[in-house]
Image: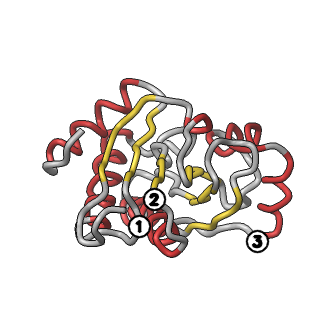
């Protein structure tokens, strides 16, 4: 176990988040938690148990996070968070997106999780500009984990393609993180 006062390792990978063997994958969900986009892929991989549990969670407001079991994916847990829909940048989208990462990391810390993987939240059908979202994601994770976050040892920024990965890598390098 790593000392509590060190930042976890931060990495950027290109992968299908549903295939990762981590303590938790973060699900970029809609407020109902009932499946579309990345959410739909996670629900398909997990099977009907995830949907049944999500129905008991009562939804999730934008910027917050909820946790469920992982079911069939290789991850033990799924952390569901609802990112903001891009409205041009004048509707607190940056703060709401940062809150998604903060809420997810704090939930992971409360449950003693060591590894977590984030997708590029809100950059798909919600239309958040990918480069801006990557900078917010990396800055928020670095800020939240600078002093250490409990048992958390590794944070993965799991990108679906090279385009998104480049934005995350650039943001991480700009903040002095190691790849």
Spot occupied by residue 158 in the image (x, y as percentages of width and height):
45, 39
Give me the disc on residue 58: 3
- Tell me what residue is drawn at x 31 percent, y 48 percent: 10
Spot occupied by residue 165 in the image (x, y as percentages of width and height):
35, 32
Disc 2 + disc 1, Cβ < 8 Å: yes
Callout 3: helix, strand or loop? Answer: loop
**Gap in angstroms between the C-alphas marked 3 and 1:** 28 Å
Give me the disc on residue 151: 1
Mark 3 vs mark 1, foreground winner is 1
Looking at the image, residue 150 lies above or below residue 114? below
Give me the disc on residue 114: 2
Quick one: label 3, few (<14), some, or many (20+) residues within 10 Å? few
Spot occupied by residue 73 in the image (x, y as percentages of width and height):
68, 42
Spot occupied by residue 93 in the image (x, y as percentages of width and height):
42, 60
- Tell me what residue is drawn at x 38 percent, y 62 percent: 98
Tell me which colouring the rendered structure shows.
Answer: secondary structure
Looking at the image, residue 168 lies above or below residue 141? above
In-image side of 119 versus 92 (left or right): right
* Earlier residue among tags 3 and 1: 3
Could you say which is closer to the camera, residue 80 or residue 150?
150
- Residue 92 visible in the picture: no
């Amino acid at each position: 176990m790593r000392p509590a006062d060190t930042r976890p390792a931060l990495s950027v990978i290109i992968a299908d988040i549903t295939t990762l063997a981590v303590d938790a994958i973060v699900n970029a969900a809609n407020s109902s938690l009932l499946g579309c986009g990345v959410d739909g892929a996670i629900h398909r991989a997990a099977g009907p148990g995830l949907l049944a549990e999500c129905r008991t969670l009562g939804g999730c407001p934008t910027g917050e996070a909820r946790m469920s079991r992982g079911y069939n994916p290789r991850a033990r847990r799924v952390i569901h968070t609802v990112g903001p829909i891009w409205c041009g940048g004048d509707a607190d989208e940056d703060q709401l997106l940062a809150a998604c990462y903060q809420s997810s990391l704090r939930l992971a810390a409360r449950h003693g999780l060591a590894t977590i993987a984030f997708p590029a939240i809100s950059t798909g059908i919600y239309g958040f500009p990918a480069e801006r979202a990557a900078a917010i994601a990396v800055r928020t994770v670095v800020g939240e984990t600078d002093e250490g976050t409990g048992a958390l040892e590794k944070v993965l920024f799991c990108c679906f393609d090279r385009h998104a990965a480049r934005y995350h890598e650039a943001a991480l390098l700009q903040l002095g993180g190691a790849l």
